[in-house]
Amino acid sequence: MAPGVLYFLVFQYLALFGNAIAFKNYMPFVGVWESEWVGFANFQALFSEPAFWQAALNTVVLSLLQLVFYFPVPLALALLLHSLMQGRLRKFVQSVVYLPHFISWVIVVALFQQVLGADGAVNGLLGGSDGHLLDIFGNPDAFRPLMVVELIWKECGWGTIIFLAALHNVDEGLYEAAALDGAGPWRRFWHVTLPSLRAVIILLLILRLGDILSVGFEQILLQRDMFGPDVAEVIDTYVYHHGIRDQNWGIAAAAALFKGVIGAMLVFSTNKIAHRMGEQGVYR
Amino acid sequence: MSITALTRSERPAWKEKPKLPTQAAKGLALIVTVVAVVVPFWVVIATSFAPDQQVIENGGYAVWPKEWTFTAYERIFDQGQVTDSLMVSIGITLAGTLFSLASTVMLAYALARPGVVGGRPVMVMILFTFLFPAGMIPSFLVVNSLGLRNTYWALFLPVLVNAFNLVVMRGFFQGIPGELFESAKLDGAGELRILWTIVLPLSKAVIAVVGLFYAVGYWNDFFRALLYLDDSSKWPLQTLMRTYVTGLNNNKLIDVQGAAAEQVHYAPQTVNMAVVVLATVPILLVYPFIQRYFTKGVLTGAIKS
């Protein structure tokens, strides 16, 4: 038990107290504890920084785009997979679509560049000898759609698992009863399938909303420099660049803490709303 | 693939006969999905095995190599950087997985046994980190103050125990019937002995799954090395590949010695893609095992709870 507990104490809890530097003028050679307290000065500096608000805006826009365009895809794919017979075809498709989840973001970005990049296969095959059909990498306008498409490619298969588990638990008798009462496939889908998925969908929506200020840190860090901070800086990469790279420790820690507090508040409030609506939510 | 293969093998009597347009639409959707996943992998593999000349003519890619050559792979292994990174990646993955697995098993076992002193507060403490994980900056400060920067310890100690994996494993251990422990206790076995001779043999599946998840995580990680290792010659493979992906190094992942001097037409993409293939192969090798244990429902049960 000891090593594991020690890990949580040192790398989680000691680190949690390290957030104190958000309220300090942290100097590395003085140390976290001895550095001078400065109250909310770091937060004032942070909030007067346009680059931070740009990063916050980028984060929220990307999150909402993912919510609208990514979120339904695993659900649709799960419904498609569930409608297949329990045979080899379904297993095969599942094996294929789960795979990208286990591939690192570095490789995923490399794959995308090789297919959709300026010198990639799509441009080469469809764009003619020197025509550039696609101008994606490095083009700020293409950044947001690209992030969503990459996310769909990597995670939508894996995302089906929780929906498939929910679909698996639906009582076949409900479908049979509905069919005997004269409900066609669409009505059965509408009145049996969807209601049985409602709890899962709401649970995932709450978790996503609580995490609205996080959007694929690794994915975006890898591609931020290519597209520039105007579109590609999000709060997490802002923390990295201002804290670790530029050594503005206090301001970066303040940004991270701000994000954490907003996230926790969002989880609490969305969970409350779910309870009001009579749903289970994440916790009671 | 015949149309009938797409229908449920045993259609219940109340269900309508599948209509042809619906079946066709489903089939098309499936084909598009599978192709979209497979094609990028294929282009990368083909490029890595294609001759330089063809890749240069195409402008940087190959869909089908005119001839299959291992030149790119030979170049990688002639040159030390990628081989070194590969060794670092393998070492970190093995050491990290071993340490993580050992710590997780011991902690999960202690938390699964009823009546362990401090069990409940420790569990609450762990679950709390789900809600408030340590951030990047504080973690960095801790690693720095412990003197772990620029050591390989920094690549796995800060992520030693994953709270989700711990909960999965604890749940599994709790499912083992208590009588087994009681009888072992009566026979005079200590806790470590019970863990070793009774619990572990019964928990092979969950240990395999959690171990594979740790291993995949360590193998795929590029960020921790970027954060904690200043010396790029110590970097694992994923962090090295990052320099290519971000376009920082003029799209050349590594400098291939001698190629320019020999006046050989050299396409850097073949080497880059060969490195990508090398980094992907271990994942493809363990993937069937992940799949097999996964379908046993070890994790789906945990996700539900």
Image: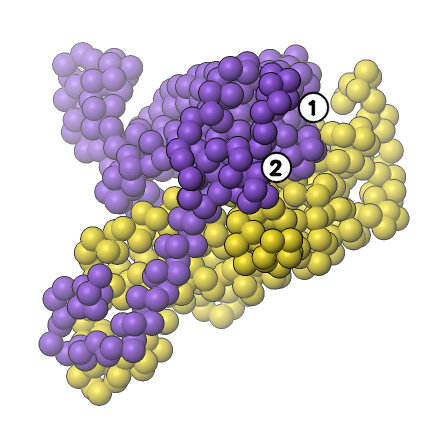
Chain colours: A yellow, B purple
Question: Is A271 in front, or is A75?
Answer: A75
Where B271 falls versus A167 (above or below)?
above
CB within 8 Å, label 1 to label 2? no
| Side of A140 where B179 appears, left or right | left
Question: Is A5 in front, or is A95?
Answer: A95
Counting from the top left corner in percent of width and height, residue B72 is at 49, 26
Counting from the top left corner in percent of width and height, residue A75 is at 41, 63
Any mark on residue A235, and which?
Answer: none
Residue at the bottom extreme, as displayed: A182
Q: Earlier in the sequence, mark 1 or mark 2?
A: 1
Query: Pointer 1: residues within 10 angstroms few (<14), some, or many (20+)?
Result: many
Displayed quadrant of residue B180: top left
Name the residue type under label 2. Val
Q: Which residue is mark 2?
A: B245
Looking at the rendered structure, the secondary structure element under dot 1 is: helix
Write the residue at 25% across / 23% down. B200
Write the residue at 17% across / 84% down. A180
| Side of B148 where B181 appears, left or right | left
Mark in front: 1 vs 2: 2
> What is the distance, in whole Å, between disc 1 and disc 2 at their CAs?
28 Å
Q: Which residue is mark 1?
A: B141
Name the residue type under label 1. Leu
Counting from the top left corner in percent of width and height, residue A183 is at 25, 84
Write the residue at 83% across / 22% down. A27
